[in-house]
Image: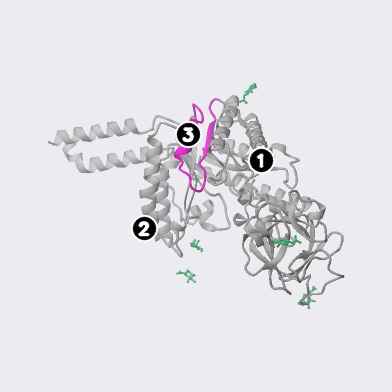
Amino acid sequence: MGSSRSRQALAFMFLYCLACPLSQSLVNGLRKVRGVNLGGWLVVERWIKPSLFDEIPNGDMLDGTQVQFKSVTLQKYVSAANGGGMNVTVDRDIPSWWETFKIWRVSENMFQFRCFGGQFLTSQSEGNVILATADIPTVSETYIVERNNTKVHIKLLSGNYLQATEDYQLKTDYDGEPGWDDNEATFEMVIYANNLHGDFQLANGYGQDKAREILMNHRHTFVTAEDFSFLSEHGINTVRIPVGWWIVQDPDPPAPFIGGTLAALDRAFSWAEVYNIRCIIDLHAAPGSQNGMEHSASRDGSVNWPSTEYITQSLDVIEFLSSRYADNPALLGIELLNEPSAAAVPIDILVSYYKSGYQIVRNYSSTAYVVVCQRIGNADPMEIYEAKIGDTNVVLDLHYYNLFDAYFVDLNPLQNMQFIYNNRVPQLQALNNANGPLVFIGEWVNEWNVTNASRREYQIFGSTQLEVYDTASFGWSYWTLKSEEKHWDFEWSIKNKYLVLNNSWKNGLSSCTTLAVTVWAIILAFYGSLLL
Ligand SMILES: *[C@@H]1O[C@H](CO)[C@@H](O)[C@H](O)[C@H]1NC(C)=O
Ligand SMILES: *[C@@H]1O[C@H](CO)[C@@H](O)[C@H](O)[C@H]1NC(C)=O
Ligand SMILES: *[C@@H]1O[C@H](CO)[C@@H](O)[C@H](O)[C@H]1NC(C)=O
Ligand SMILES: *[C@@H]1O[C@H](CO)[C@@H](O)[C@H](O)[C@H]1NC(C)=O
Ligand SMILES: *[C@@H]1O[C@H](CO)[C@@H](O)[C@H](O)[C@H]1NC(C)=O
C-alpha cells in the first residue's frame, strides 16, 4: 500500500516534470517573461502623467474634444442634419450626435469643427450660410473662437461673426462686433467629451517649440537607468516598450509629432544590456490609429488604420525597427500592433498584416519573437491564435484587466479573484494546450473596481493574478512602470508592498519549478513517512 502510493507519487512527479516546460527557455537564460511596460513614455497618455498637459493654453479645446453650441437667443443647438452633407441648422432642443462636433485645433484660438459623419463645417457657400460639406479643412473651414467662460463667439478668418438667425440658420453675416449680452452671435459652448490626451493633442496643443521642450524633458526623466536597475533587482527580466509610428522618421517626423523617441529607445536598449533585461518593442500607435484611443495617437477618435496606405506605412515601421534592432542582444521581440479595435479593424485585414509583419521580422532575425495582439472589444483571441501567422516564435498578446467593462463594476474582492480563476485560467489553459503561438499577458494591473480596498486585499489580488498569469507560456508584463495613479505604478506598488513578487524569480526559477517544489513538499508531507 505504502510503496504503491509512493510509486504513484513519484510517477506523478515524473509526469509533472515532463509536462513542465522547464527544459524550454525562450532565449538563453530566460525561461519566462516577467515584464513591465514602459507606458506613457514614448507614447504619451495624460492620465499617466497629467502635468505634461498643464501649460497648454485653452487646454480644454484640444484635438478630438467634442463640443456642442447652443444659441443664447434661440435656445437651440447647432445641428448638422444626418451627421453632415448638407446645411447647418440651429433648431435642436436636445443635443445628440448631429449636434456634437469634434475639434481639430489649428492654434490656441483657431479651430475646425468635424461633424459626426466626418465632414467639416465650411463657410464656402452661397448666401452666407454655414454648410457641413467640406471633406478636407482649409482656411474656409477654420474659425476663431473667442471665449468668455462657457460663452463663445465664432468668427471667420475674414473677421465676420457667425450668428443664429430667426429662421434657424447658421449664417456668417452678423453685423459688427457682438458683446457678451444675449445676441445672435453668442453661443453657449458645452464640452461634451474631452477624453483624448495623447501625443497628437500634446504636440498640437503646445505647438512645436514648447512641445519639443516638454517632451525632451519627459523622455529624459520619466524612464532612466535607475528604473532598469530597480526592475532588475526585483526579478523583472523584460520591458515592453510602446512606440509611435513616427519613430520611423526620427528626428524629423511629420507635424505635430516630435522627434527624439528613437534616441530614447536606443537608451533603453543600452540600459537593458547593462541590467540584463530584454526588450519587446511594441507598435502602440499606428498611422491612422488602430483603435481611436489616445494611446494610438488618434487625432479625433477616428480609426483609419485599415487602409492600404496606413498598413504599408506600418510595415515600413516594422521593417525599420527590425533592421535597427534585430542584432541587438537585448531584443526579445517586436509586437506588430497594439490593441486593434474589433469594431473597426476587420480580422482578415489584421491577419494579413500580421503575416506580412512576421515575414519582415523573420527576414532580419530567425529568433526574435513576433508578438501579435488580440483585437479589443468583442473578439475571441482564438481568431488570432488559429490564424497561422508564422512558423516559429510567434506570441499572442492578451490584455487582462478587471476593469473597462460593466461586468467588473461593483464586484467585491472575492468575486474579482473568482473571475481570474473561472475565466482567465480556462482561457489560458486552452491556449497553452493548443498547438499554436505562445501566450503572453502583455498588459495587466493590480487594480480593480473596488473602492478603498485594503493593502492586504491588493496583495492577495496581485498574488492571484501573478500565480495565474505566470502559467502563460510566454509570460506577462505589468502595466505600467510609473503612473500618477498609484496602483497602476509598478514601482510604487512594489515599494509600498501592494504587490508582492515571489522571490524565487530572482533566482531565475520558473513558476513551474516553484509549483513543482510545492507539489513535492506536499507529497513529502503526506507520504514522506511511507517513503522512508
Ligand atoms: C436646410 O436643411 C433643412 C433640413 O435639415 C431644410 O429644411 C432647409 O430647407 C435647408 N435650408 C437651406 C437654406 O438649404
Ligand atoms: C464676459 O462676459 C461678461 C458678461 O456676461 C462681461 O461682463 C465681461 O466683461 C466679459 N469678459 C470679457 C473678458 O469680455
Ligand atoms: C527579405 O529580404 C530580401 C533581401 O533583403 C528582400 O528581397 C525581400 O523582399 C524581403 N522580404 C520581406 C518580406 O520583406
Ligand atoms: C468603478 O466603475 C464606475 C463606473 O465605471 C466608476 O464610476 C468608478 O469610478 C469605478 N470605481 C473604481 C474604484 O474604479
Ligand atoms: C473611501 O475612503 C475615503 C477616505 O478615507 C472616504 O472618504 C470614502 O467615504 C470611502 N468610500 C467608501 C465607499 O467607503
Residue 179 picture quarter? bottom right
Check if mark 1's residue and mark 2's residue have beta carbons within 8 Å. Answer: no
Sequence order check, earlier mark of 1 and 2: 1
Name which quarter of the figure residue 163 lies in.
Answer: bottom right
The quarter of the rendered structure image containing the N terminus is top left
Circle 2 SS class = helix
Q: Position of residue 171 (x, y in %)?
A: 79, 64
In the image, what residue type sits under mark 3?
Answer: Leu
- Give the crowd class for mark 1: few <14, some 14-19, many >=20 residues within 10 Å: many
- Name the residue tied to disc 2: 414
Q: Secondary structure at mark 1?
A: helix
The residues colored magenta run 366-395
> Dot 3: what SS?
loop
Find disc 3 in the rendering and name its residue: 30
- Residue nearest the observer in this picture, 172 or 363: 172
In this rendering, the answer to whether 12 lies above or below 186 is above
**Above or below, comparing residue 152 to residue 39 in the picture:** below
The magenta stretch spans residue 370:
yes
The x and y percentages for residue 423 are: 38, 48
Please name whichever residue, 384 or 249, is drawn nearer the observer in this view of the structure.
Answer: 384
Name the main secondary structure of what is drawn in magenta. loop
Choose between 437 and 133: the one closer to the eye: 133
Place of residue 367 in the rendered image (x, y in percent of width and height, measured from the top left): 53, 27
Identify the coloring: one colour
Point out the image quarter for the C terminus.
Answer: top left
Q: Residues within 10 Å of mark 2 (few under 14, many from 20)?
A: few
Q: Residue at label 1?
A: 245
Tell me if I can see residue 532 in this picture: no
Q: Quadrant of ligand 3?
A: top right
Mark 1 residue CB less than 8 A from any atom of ligand 3? no
